[in-house]
Image (cartoon, grey):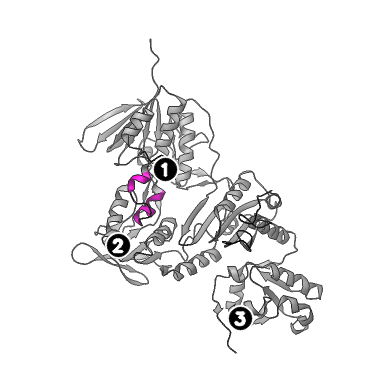
Amino acid sequence: MSKRRKKILIIGGVAAGPKAAARARRCDPGAEITIIEEGSFLSYAGCGMPFYVGGMVEKHEELMATTAGVVRDAGFFRNVKDINVLTGTRAEAIDRKNKIVRVTNLATHETYDLPYDKLVLATGSKPVRPPLPGMDLAGVYTLGSLEEALVVRKAVEQGSRRVVIVGGGLIGLELADVLGAKAAVTIVEMMDHVLSTLLDPELCILVERFLRGKGVQLVLGSRVERIEGNGDGAVARVITTAGSLDADLVVVAAGVKPRVELAREAGLELGETGAIKVNEYLQTSDPDIYAGGDCVENIHLISGRPVYTPMGSVANRHGRVIGNNATGGRDIFPGVLGTAILKVFEMNIGRTGLSENEARRLGYNVQSFICPAPDRAHFYPGSKPIIVKLVADASTRKLLGAQILGPGDVDKRLDVVVAALSMGATVDQLASFDLAYAPPFSTALDPLTHAANCLRNKLDGRAKSINPLEVKRRLKAGEDFVLLDVRTPAEFNEIRLPYPNVVFIPLGKLRERAKELPQDREIVVFCKVSLRGWEAQTILESLGFTNVSFFEGGIAAWPFELDTGPRPS
């Protein structure tokens, strides 16, 4: 008598679902595996949709293809993987007692039951659709599926020249990047800054200055009140609390929320984030039902708290774990670090772990440092700057997170920090990593090593530094202190801080001219990247000055106003 084939039923065919199916097939060649997908397209790179909309990806099939160029459609899964795929099919309800799923063929409206031994929920997420008047107008989209990306791409190609993006997160900024050369782009963000959930404010402001320099209009700290049409049912303008914006294309990129309706109606436990709660094996509260991808919450590896982090990379890692475990394995998914990276024009932006603001809210004894550096030897052609911000717990010296941005190589430094955080490294251990060096790839001390050493000096009480936000706060409050610029005359002539309390003394002249500085006032030193600022701090302290610090990042990371060009005579 032949052995009964295990039935593995998967609801969702974009990321976690197909990955779970493919892994389950490798682990159990005899299993009967079925994917149910409500849409038309399978196993596509949702994170690639902005690049398809902008034309960088020529054909949408490329988002569905293997590296060999084979499109992952139903035929591919059937012929190559022996996996049955039901596209255009909606899962209506889960009967946990009888272990069946009621489904409907959306073309024929036929409803029938599918049995399972193991069920996988990979239902993903859906775009947040604010309840705004005008959301149903032609030309208003959310970019929540590949089907919608096809329509947005067509609208762009047909000449939409005034684009309003509602939301200044990852998708919003990526769209601004790819559409910036084709249209006048405005981003409306209800928070005070773009990328406010990824970066700390001083780095957000740097990104904003860069975007404005690229011609992107930013409307920050403002809400959309309604979207108005032109009388023919098409979008004409977006009305915000800051005023009216003309538009012939609107993309609402206000985030996503997990699709949990099936799970909730089946009585499965939801977590505090509103997503499906799973254990370390990615089992739901029903051990025969697994869940992964954008519909579940994860545990943050640093804070230990539940978080909702809808990322394609996480969904694919979930899928592999589920594929193993649905076929008898006991693989563990340990959690996430909230790692994210994006490219906006020539700027690369990444973060992992906790930001400084997040760490403070969680009660850590936070210490941080902002450190600009070239991404490779400054004398090697193609060297570009990056800015590294490291966050640590001053009590334990454990690394908590990092934010890195700039036109230089950000990704490899970010991934080193991911490894360090995953092993629970201290700042001292990060500084000791034996990172690769040759002038085409790095500086002799990698920017990460340099940043870690700077933070160690701060933790040890040697470097007395302050955040540029604190400097700006003191300036705004009218506090009495000296801003000491110790750069070279050429640097000072090119770009300067436009404040009356700035005193310029080049570092090489500081010892002989220190008597020009008042010893009874606070002195905050700065240079281009902080190194000379720290040297100036030590020089002044050796000469008897007792209230000296420097601000981190120097001119390179100063996010506020600057004077440029030759100074007036």
Q: Earlier in the sequence, mark 1 or mark 3?
A: 1
Q: Does 455 sit left or right of 292 as displayed?
A: right
Residue 133 makes an appearance in the image: yes
Please state, as top left, top right, bottom left or bottom right, where the N terminus lies in the image.
top left
Measure the C-alpha gap from mark 2 to mark 3. Answer: 44 Å
Quick check: is 470 in the magenta stretch?
no
Q: Amino acid at mark 2?
A: Leu
Q: Amino acid at mark 1?
A: Cys
Residue drawn at (42%, 44%) of the image:
294
Quick check: is 62 in the magenta stretch?
yes
Q: Amino acid at mark 3?
A: Asn
Residue holding disc 3 = 493
Which segment is the magenta one? 47-63
Near-viewer residue (243 or 42)? 42
Does residue 119 sit above or below 490 in this rendering? above
Viewer-side label of 2, 3: 3
Residue 353 makes an appearance in the image: no
In percent of width and height, residue 539 lies at 78, 73
Q: Is label 2 in a helix, a strand or a loop?
A: strand
Please state, as top left, top right, bottom left or bottom right, where the C terminus lies in the image.
bottom right
Q: Residue extending furthest bottom? A: 569
Residue holding disc 1 = 295
Measure the C-alpha gap from mark 1 to mark 3. Answer: 55 Å
Residue holding disc 2 = 249
Within 10 Å of disc 3 (Cα), the crowding (few <14, some 14-19, many 20+) is some
Q: Earlier in the sequence, mark 2 or mark 3?
A: 2
Residue drawn at (57%, 52%) of the image:
414
